Image (tube, rainbow, N blue to C red):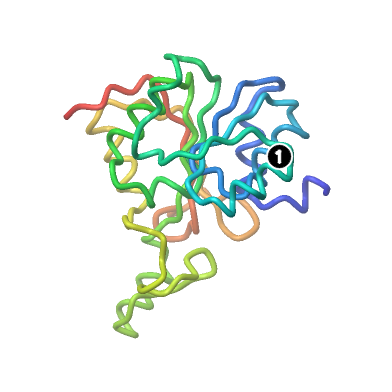
Amino acid sequence: MSENQIQLDYQVITSLVQPGARVLDLGCGDGELLAHLARARAAKVQGVELDEQSIYKCVAKGLSVFHSDIDSGLAGYPDQSFDVVILNESIQQVKKVDYVLEEALRVGRRVIVGFPNFAHYRVRWGLLFNGRSPTTPNLPFQWHNTPNLRFLSISDFHHYCMERGIKVLKAYYLGKKKALHVLPNLRAFNAIFVISNGQIKK
């Protein structure tokens, strides 16, 4: 599979991972991103995933994945044991956001957080004019079957990091095919943040 065939958020995340890096993916799903990082960056990858069917798919790809709920923490991992910890499309699905991020920042030198932007103009438009929970290409679920527990925007996450003393190293705002720089909170389908040196303030 060529780089152009890889979905945009995976391309951005891959560009942020140094060759040979130690990577932990929290909520790694079927392992597609981890497998790509192992191929493209020769990264030493591990995953944590709760869904058993997804774990089987990871194992079929030859990946090392632990069956665990990331809301339970990462007690088995020493401080700074990974170069990169990834939370892509999973932060909006966890129950204990502060705790999960605190643990990710503890075990990783850098943390990459990717999430759908719930303030995209299509979401706003759908709610305003249809009066129903909106769906978009990046948020295809109905209210009754969505895995998302939290609904955050790009501005929300910026504010969250600032309020808790988490350092934002880089931020990328993604449209369908390319990064966006103008009005990202309104126009971006999803965002990717690189954070570090977090000190969660209770």
Q: Would you say 133 lies left or right of 122 here?
A: left
What residue is shown at x 72% (from left), y 40% (from top)? Answer: 36
Which one is nearer the viewer's eye here, 118 or 50? 50
Which x, y percent locates residue 19? 71, 22
Image quadrant of residue 150? bottom left
Q: Residues within 10 Å of mark 1 (few under 14, many from 20)?
A: some
What residue is shown at x 65% (from left), y 43% (from top)? Answer: 33
Residue 53 versus residue 40 in the image, above or below: below
Which one is nearer the viewer's eye here, 29 or 67? 67
What residue is shown at x 38% (from left), y 78% (from top)? Answer: 126
What residue is shown at x 50% (from left), y 59% (from top)? Answer: 189
Q: Would you say 39 lies left or right of 47 here?
A: right
Image quadrant of residue 98? top left
What element does badge 1 sit on? helix
Q: Would you say 155 lies left or right of 86 here?
A: left
The amino acid type, in three-letter code, at marker 1 is Ala
The quarter of the rendered structure image containing the C terminus is: top left
The residue identified by callout 1 is 35
Q: Would you say 50 lies left or right of 31 here?
A: left
Which x, y percent locates residue 57? 67, 50
Which one is nearer the viewer's eye here, 195 or 145? 145
Residue 129 versus residue 84 in the image, above or below: below
